[in-house]
Amino acid sequence: MNRHFNILVSIIVAAFICSLTSCVSPKKVILLQGSDSIFASPQKIMQDYQLRIKAADRLTIKVHCQDKELLEPFTNEITLGGTTMSNRGGLAEGMGGFTVSPEGDIIVPLLGKISVLGMTREECARKLEQLIKDKGYINDATVKVDFQDAHITVLGAINGGVISLSSERTSILDVLGQCGGDVTVGAHRQNIRLYREVNGERIMYRFDITDAKLFNSPCYYVQQNDIIYVEPSSTVLIDNSPFAKWWSLVGTGLGVVSTIVAVIALVK
């Protein structure tokens, strides 16, 4: 009887140890830990969250003024193929907007080549307004500049894809929220990567969404063309490995054996 009991205890302990491999520590799941201490007092926002114009961006530029006839020189154009572009109140470079060259320039009707690299939308608009006034075309011009297709790409252990930026002030948490509301337990929340183009170079940030220090990270606010990769957790990688599948079968077998031994011990 004692011998059977000892065997039973040993098997149950082994099965319990196997079950621990699927447990996940709360520290790896709970988001923004440490918020209570960091936000004991209000924190000033230090990051520049405005999108800045980069090469290959496409811009929509609209000009407004009191005398609509003054806009005609900017809006009447003939594109290749014979299509007439006549859009009162808006500058036109075909239907694709104004594409920023690799050197950071756009070519605007009557105004010529203009360097806009690194500018915000507002800075670009003010520069165009001043040029239109300085060249004597319109004295009361109001210019509005918008990004036509600003987007980011989210990949990895998350329901991601290509996400359009509807606002200039979009945080990494906003992006992850759009990808399903939360990063699953199957994702490595402490090691998410962000790839960004800065001054013709590509750099990489690593950030941890379980740590409230994320709010002070330079990648907290996303920029157009950012690539975010959510790495699978080690648990997922292990669970999908051949060894894990074999070990799962072993655990199941141990559970069955322990049940049989327990029944035999009770009968005797």
Image (tube, rainbow, N blue to C red):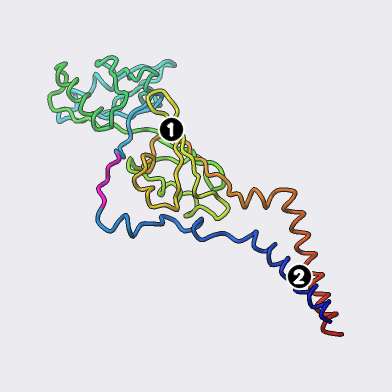
Residue 74: where, in percent of width, then height? 26, 21
Q: Quadrant of residue 152?
A: top left
Verify whether residue 44 appears in magenta.
Answer: yes
What residue lies at 43% left-to-right and 46% top-to-bottom? 175
* Mark 1 residue crowding within 10 angstroms, few (<14) / some (14–19) / many (20+): many
Residue at label 2?
10
Q: Which mark is residue 50?
A: none
Residue 111: where, in percent of width, then height? 24, 16
Is residue 236 positioned above or below 17 on the image? above
What residue lies at 15% left-to-right and 31% top-to-bottom? 66
Q: Residues in magenta? A: 43-47
Residue 147: where, in percent of width, then height? 35, 33
Q: Quadrant of the C terminus?
A: bottom right
- Mark 2 lies on a secondary structure that is helix
Is residue 13 positioned above or below 236 on the image? below
Q: Quadrant of the N terminus?
A: bottom right
| Number of the front mark, 1 or 2 | 2
- Mark 1 lies on a secondary structure that is strand
Question: For this rendering, which residue is in front, 177 or 190?
Answer: 190
Residue at label 1?
196
Verify whether residue 148 appears in magenta.
Answer: no
Q: Is residue 258 left or right of residue 171?
A: right
